[in-house]
Amino acid sequence: SAVISQKPSRDICQRGTSLTIQCQVDSQVTMMFWYRQQPGQSLTLIATANQGSEATYESGFVIDKFPISRPNLTFSTLTVSNMSPEDSSIYLCSVRTGTSYEQYFGPGTRLTVT
Amino acid sequence: SQQGEEDPQALSIQEGENATMNCSYKTSINNLQWYRQNSGRGLVHLILIRSNEREKHSGRLRVTLDTSKKSSSLLITASRAADTASYFCAPAGLTGGGNKLTFGTGTQLKVEL
């Protein structure tokens, strides 16, 4: 497995602003992903963060709203842009190491938009 | 959709008893993973079972997979109070290279002393 940290752990933001969430892994990983967990709901995959190229977004998520960067094999950021209260969620990054399909999750960032 | 659906939604047992949670999904999978989430915390990976496997064990955990019925089960033996958490299954479909996990709403397990 890998040790994954996220910053910030939580934040309260005003509508219309943007927040960038960082995901740092203690070792190089093959793949990184971003998920959202809305209150009382299950996790939904937002996108796959690709190193050195544009992220691959799932249906219902767009780059203008959730720009993602992955400059190297251990770090990625997710920005939640022009936030509204509906963006209040826990945002989690996950990683896949080596050739195994197992995904390991970071502790999450709890975002509240007022 | 491929989303895993867990059953039951909630389960309350006494410490020492076994807990069984079930998961159903709709389309063919590459693998299926089980996770635990303690209240307000991140997800902990429990076990992965590939589509060509029928059973896996890890400590007190036993996972089965029946691809003909598109279902999986997670058995926790000799449960402890510390097992109290939400449990999610996450099937990964054939598209997305086996990486796209789709989560259900989970089973909330409460283990009472």
Image: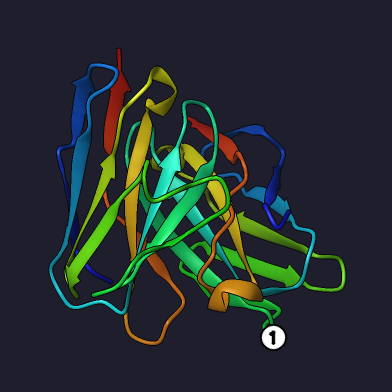
Q: Is residue A53 above or below residue B35?
A: below
User: How many discs appear?
Assistant: 1
Residue A48 vertical placement versus A99 (above, below): above
Binning the other alpha carbons within 10 Å of mark 1 as few (below 14), some (14 to 19) or many (20 upward) gives few
User: Residue at point 42% right, 42% down?
Assistant: A36
Task: State the image coordinates of residue A91 (x, y, percent, origin top left).
Answer: 34, 41
Dividing the picture into quadrants, the one containing residue A75 is: bottom left
Percent x, y of residue A60: 55, 45
Apparent side of residue A95 relative to residue A57 in the rendered image (left or right): left
Q: Residue lying farthest top?
A: A114
Instruction: Using the rendered view, name the quadrant where residue B91 is placed.
Output: bottom right
Can the viewer see residue B76 in this picture?
no
Residue A50 occupies quadrant: bottom left
Above or below residue A51? Residue A64 is: above
**Residue A17 locus on image (x, y percent):** 22, 25
- Residue depicted at 36% across the width and 45% down the height: A64
Please state which amino acid type lies under the numbered disc 1.
Asn
- Which residue has dot 1 on it? B52
Coloration mode: rainbow
Quadrant for the N terminus of chain A, please.
Answer: bottom left
Residue B86, given in percent of the width and then of the height, sits at 50, 39
